[in-house]
Structures are given as C-alpha cells and as structure tokens.
Amino acid sequence: MDRNAAELPVENIAAYRFVPIADPAVVADRLRAQAESLGLRGSVLVAPEGLNLFLAGGDDAIAAFLDALRADARFAGLQARRSRSATTPFARLKVKVKPEIIAFRRDDASPLAARAPAVAPATLARWIAQGADDDGRRLLLLDTRNREEVAHGTFAGALALPIDNFVDLPAAVLAEREALADATVVSFCTGGIRCEKAALWMRAQGLDNVLQLDGGILGYFEAVGGFGYEGACFVFDARVALDPALAPLPDPAPAPGIASPPAPAGAGERAESASGTH
C-alpha cells in the first residue's frame, strides 16, 4: 500500500474462513450486533461451511470487531485483507445466513474436507519472471472470476473463462481441459475464496497439477505489488477497482487489450448482491 492510500481515513477488510458452523443464525445475530455497535458497514455471510465478510469503518472499530470475532475459536485463524478509502464504500450493513459462503453447488469441492495446495505470492512472482515453475514446467494462470471483473484487469497471459457466474466455472474449465493438462495451473480470484473451491473441484476431476494463489489478487498486491499484472482488481463495492497499491481508482480503466468494463451502476450495492464473492 502506498503512502497516499495509507493516509485515507476508512479501513476496508475482506476476510473468509471455511470452518464448520453448527449455529449459523446465532453467529449471524452476534456479528450483526457487534458490527452495528461499532458503526461498521458492509456485508457478512454466514453458512454451515464458514464465514465471508467485507466491512468498512474506522481503524479502532475494525480492530475491535476482529478481536471479538477471533475470540471465537472457530475464527481464531481468520486473516483479513486490508485496503483504505476516502469514504465508506458500502451503503449499509447487511448480515445474511446462506447455504454456502460462496455459491458453487458442487459436493466434490468442500474446503471443510481438504484444501488444494497453495502458492505464495512471492513464489508466483518468481514463476512469472521465469515463465515456468521451479521444475521448469509451463505456467498457466487461470482466472476464475467473471467477465465483468476480468475486464478491469488480470495477470498478463492469464486464461480468462467466459463466465458470468461462479457456478458456470466447471463447464468452462472442462472445455479448456486440454490446455490445462500439461501445465502447472495457478488458479486465482480476488481474495482467494473462489479458488478454495475451484482448485479442489479441478483436482477432483483429475487435474492434479492445479494450485491456488494464496490470498488471491489482493494478497498478491499486498505482498509483491503489481508485477505481472495488467490493470486493476475489480471489487464488489463503490470503489469499483483497486490498483496494485490497493488504492481506489478515481476513474477505473480497463487493462491494455482488455475490453472496456461496463458502467459501474449501483456499485454501492454490489457487495450485497454478489453472493459473498471474493
């Protein structure tokens, strides 16, 4: 994060954790009360498979919320991706109980049972510079986000799937199976949550060369900046997109060679209707 972004007054966090939750309604009520008492806005999804949230507010309020959340042993290991903005990018606070914290509708992709191997941002940056993994195998970056998100930016040379919803990913991946077969595939998304399921599902289909980028694009920006990335990272709130310094763009523009993104109508409501997308 650059110095100018660090001086912005509002802290934004994106976080998720896959963990069994037997009482999602109880957890949702508690988190709603805590967030309301601290004046936070954003989106919180709770499901039997875990927790997914986007929240914004003052530094002290965010810290207090995270401290209270991590006091519950189920969420003690939760890691938050942080960025800053001049104003709160959410219109209100919305807390919901859902069947899944990221809708995929596949029984063979449960992060509660296992986790696909992950690659650290610094390692991926090295592989991008090399053009191959450390064993010399061809590197293929697989973007698991939808077309609207990809239009704002992606890794150079990444395979972007022609999908509008995450539930459409399996059919799109199978259509590209031949291209994926002889490469080390690193799947990525905004913050990592979609790849938790996508990489597991792909490995269940016999694509055992699939990894996931730990922390997603936002984690990569935070760790190594924008090396190998073209454009900005779309986010589901009023900021629309973040640059590699994790700063909001005043006028988000598409990456070179990528189609212009659609107008950001209703951006302030996106996080409430995006089914917990990270």
Image (tube, helix red, strand yellow):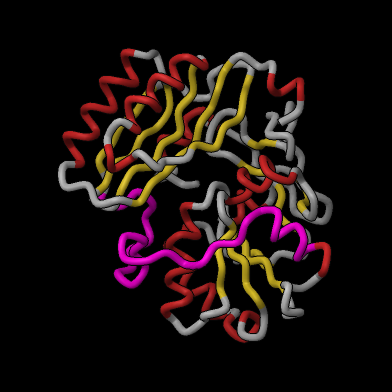
The residue sitting at 63% across, 49% down in the picture is 217
Residue 168 showing in the rendered view:
no
The answer to if 111 sits in the magenta stretch is yes
Q: Position of residue 63 (x, y in %)?
A: 45, 21
The residue sitting at 33% across, 72% down in the picture is 108
The residue sitting at 47% across, 31% down in the picture is 269
Q: Position of residue 205 (x, y in %)?
A: 44, 81
Quadrant position of residue 120: bottom right
Looking at the image, residue 196 sits to the left or right of residue 209; the answer is: left
Quadrant position of residue 104: bottom left
Location of residue 55 with respect to 80 vertically, above or below: above
The residue sitting at 72% across, 43% down in the picture is 232
Residue in front for this viewpoint, 149 or 126: 126
Q: Position of residue 247 (x, y in %)?
A: 70, 29
Total marks shown come to 0
Which range is magenta? 99-128
